[in-house]
Amino acid sequence: MQRKSAHVRYAFVVSGVLSAPECHAVFLIKRRLKMSIKHLVIGLTAVTFLTGAAQAATFSGSTGGTFLRANGFDGSGSLTGIGTSSIAWGRPGKSTMEILDYSFSHSLQSGTNSYQIGALEWFNATWYNFDDLFRVFANLQLDLDDPLDQTTNDTVKLKIDTSNNNASDPSDLAVITQFDDFDLALPFVLGKGITLKSFSVSLDGDGALRQKNGKTKWRTDEHGTSRLIINAEIEKVSAVPLPAAGWMLLAGVGGLVGMRRRKKAA
């Protein structure tokens, strides 16, 4: 093949079409073009790979926690469970509140969306002769796995109003304060085009939820169970699609490479 190329260049020289320096210049141009095509193919392949990777982004981790301490409780309802993830109080029935161990793994959609990352569960038992107002403090822990490996905590204060349960007052109320950001500087960049914008709560079960003056008022019906759902608002930047012209160019380059290989084989 080398002799054939040399012969062609010699033919151009003797016929007066191209001089020896001009032939050498043509040779250099062809070599540079070959290298440019190779680099272009590599670049377009990388863009395609990265586009696919961005579309498959995952947000995963777990949450849990512990009740740290309580104050204002008069003792008649025997509050138990401090130092664990579940507390109980009251008589004759026992009301319970638990910080659930919750694992999550979400395939993220483009734009800003809400995803559950944890929950607290409250069962409201019947109290016949008890009326109290007390506070409990809990530590919530967030362990992120993907796209960023990080552990962080937040302190939650719950003011629980345990009024007598009767026909005119069939529910108890927990007012939640001091829960806002898991001690993260929001918005928090997680990487891979993903940003944690904020946290929010929602309710599932027998009760009601109301936000007022920066506080969350969580009410659970008598004999009822409700869950306070902790959500993360996640923004995922949309992958920039490769323009149609780019795909056409890639196809054309592939055709040129195929033709070149066929020529070599011949």
Image (cartoon, helix red, strand yellow):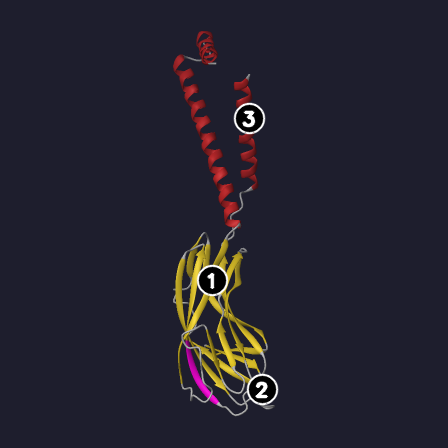
Select label 3 or label 2 by which is in front. Answer: 2
At label 1, the amino acid type is Ser
Image mark for residue 223: none
Q: Which residue is mark 3?
A: 258
Label 1 CA crowd tier, 10 Å (few <14, some 14–19, many 20+): some
Estimate the x, y position of residue 128 in percent, counting from the top left: 55, 91
Q: Nearer the viewer, mark 1 or mark 3?
A: 1
Q: Is residue 247 left or right of residue 78?
A: right
Considering only vertical position in the picture, is 138 above or below 238? below
State the quadrant of the C terminus. Answer: top right
Counting residues from the start of the chain, the first of labels 3 and 2 encountered is 2
Neighbour tally class for label 2: few under 14, some 14-19, many 20 plus, Cα within 10 Å: some
In the image, residue 167 sits, relative to residue 14, either above or below, namely: below
Q: Position of residue 193 (x, y in %)?
A: 46, 53
Q: Element at badge 1?
A: strand
Q: Quadrant of residue 79?
A: bottom left
Q: Identify residue type, mark 2.
A: Pro
Label 2: element kind = loop
Dot 3 surroundings within 10 Å: few (below 14), some, or many (20 or more)? few
- What residue is at 41 percent from the left and 61 percent from the top? 188
Q: Earlier in the sequence, mark 1 or mark 3?
A: 1
Q: Residue at x 53, y 50 (%)?
A: 55
**Residue picked out by circle 1:** 62
Labels 2 and 1: the sequence-earlier one: 1
Look at the numbered disc 3 and give the secondary structure of its residue.
helix
**x and y, in percent, of residue 154 in the image:** 40, 70
Which residue is farthest top? 14
Q: Which mark is residue 170?
A: 2
Work out whether residue 45 or residue 121 is closer to the camera in this orientation and state it. Answer: 121
Q: Is residue 176 visible?
A: yes
- Residue stretch rendered in magenta on the structure: 132-137
Q: CA distance from mark 1 to mark 3?
A: 50 Å
